[in-house]
Image (tube, rainbow, N blue to C red):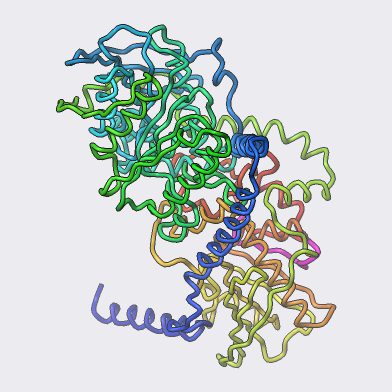
Amino acid sequence: MNSALVCVVALAAAIGQTDQDSLRVIPNDSELRPATRLRELLLEQVEAAAKLRREKYEALKTPEECETYQRELRDFFVRQIGGLPPGVGDPERRPAAEVAGTLEADGFRVEKIIYESRPRHHVTAALFLPTSSGPHPAVLIACGHTKTGKGAEYNQRMAISLAKHGIAAMCYDPIGQGERSQILTEDGSAKYSASTTEHFLVGVGSILVGRGTATYRIVDGLRGIDYLCGREDIDAARIGCTGCSGGGTLTSYLMALDERVACAAPSCYLTTFEQLLTQLGPQDSEQNIFGQVAFGMDHADYVLMRAPRPTLICSTTRDFFPIAGTWDAFRQAKRFYGRLGFPERVDLVEIDSTHGVPQPSREAMVRWMRRWLLNRDEAVTEPDFDVFRPEQLWCTPDGEVLRLEGERSVFDLNLAEAERLSEARQSKWNAAADIQRREAVRKVTGIRPLDELPAAMIEELGSIERDGVRIDKLLLTTDDGMILPTLRFVPKQPQAESSVLYLHGDGKTADAGPDGPIARLVQAGQTVWAVDLRGFGETAVDGKNDLLGSDWKEFYTAYLLGKSFVRMRAEDALAAQRAIVGKASSTQTVALVAKGDAVIPALHAAALEPQCFASVEFDREPLSWMEILRTNEPRNEFQNVVHNSLAVYDLPDLMPLTKAAKQD
């Protein structure tokens, strides 16, 4: 490129940037902080939900009230993960399994286990067995977020120490870790080195079918317990569970849901959502159950659900999971256990360390397991020993279970469930009237009807002139307090009864250039309201994440509250429409134009309230959600998914519900 052309390109870019700046509604130095406003609002809702939950907890006084509380929580938990597949927990339907090899060591031996979690979906595990004769108590060890999975040193140290102290221990690979990569390169190796990436990618499609990454992780663990209980050398009445970090998450889930877990010791996870979301934000996909904060299922409730079975909360002082929340959760559990008459069965260990399970934590865990599973309460010292190289614990020939013939990934399982749901819903959808279809969509999305959705309030912040067009800078504020920066383009001779609501995923200025699409509408006499829906334009979250989206933490905070970006943005669009109509005469009509990532929420708004829009125009036809299920690397799609939506409808089903729909 020659120097003259470089100068021209640079000048054009500079002019474009200057124009963008002149169209900014909220100054960069404003105290409003539009890029963080959504997070602040969501945290206010988290705080309110936590307050309601605390009031409900404090009202529990009798054992009967506590048992009702436990039952309601467990029922909710199972419902939110999409239920459990047939056979889980059934002693007559143990998972198919094989021993792929053995290792002999000093004071213990290892069996390499492959068991079937779901049909043609296998879990790789290492079972560490004492050399003494059985049947032994056994502890299931859930892995934290380490790429080597069961081969990670800290997992092996927990397992070996347990085995040397008379307790069998089985550590299994989670999806995306160890031998269970769900996305392979052409040469058959794991594509992603991070231990959480696949968990997030699995989460996108799982949400659409009413599941979550947690669903698959939980079933893997429950089937692991099924396997242990079916072995003659294991005492099914003496099962424990432990794990650190992400393994602490799974331990918390399993101990809450499975009464066979007689003794549990989750490590470096339990805190409170109020502390976690305020200080750190939501974490990996499986650590977020849809609507649990809104319902009132906090971290402490994983302990409360299993009361009065013995539980040791292992923690570290300088963990990134807030230690203040850990103590809060423990105190709630201690009081709850006391109401049931067993306060001694729950305890907490805090080690002055960072995130992890250091030796003192491991020793405390082993002592706790021996106390309740072997009836021996005595000090435990972890001896010195070597651990295996991760590949020594491989159960498969190549270290990747997905390379086994006929193996199905979690992406395959999600797609199969989506196809099943599609077949099941088609006849019901086809037989329903439009009013019934809209009601079904409204129920699953949570989008409020117009009579429950106030018009956005309008604040005028000034105007500028450009090419004879007045551009008003407005601030729309929704009923939940979200600010929507808006530009109103007013032609010299406007059509008095007609306006356009213009929504763009790249923000209100994306098409606002002097010769752009908005300018052409204005030249035709249209008054155009270009609105930044939450998370777009000036309200976009700072940062960049091409795979998950820069606002994935805001998505999951909303998800915990039982909301989606689709719902919130669709309501923004409807609140903006009401503001436009309210500002003008009663005969005002509003045309809807949506582009890019604004299309899906706009489609929902137009389908549910077709009377609000005289016409609807999208720059692209919304693809079927099934397309997300057909890829194992959906990019920036959290913003576009709705929990369990495919049980009710798909995006193409909404198009006939809109008025005068048009796609270019």
Q: Which residues are magenta?
A: 609-621
Q: Residue at x 50, y 42 (%)?
A: 333
127 on left or right of 59: left
- Percent coordinates x, y for residue 308 in the rendering: 53, 32
Location of residue 447 with respect to 104 vertically, above or below: below
- Percent coordinates x, y for residue 419 in the rendering: 61, 32
- Percent coordinates x, y for residue 626 in the rendering: 58, 40
98 on left or right of 62: left
Location of residue 448 with respect to 583 vertically, above or below: above
Residue 355 is covered by the magenta coloring = no
Q: Is residue 79 visible?
A: no
- Percent coordinates x, y for residue 182 in the rendering: 40, 33
612 on left or right of 527: right
Total numbered labels: 0
Q: Nearer the viewer, residue 653 or 77?
A: 77
Q: Residue at x 24, y 76 (%)?
A: 2
Quarter of the figure that contains the N terminus: bottom left
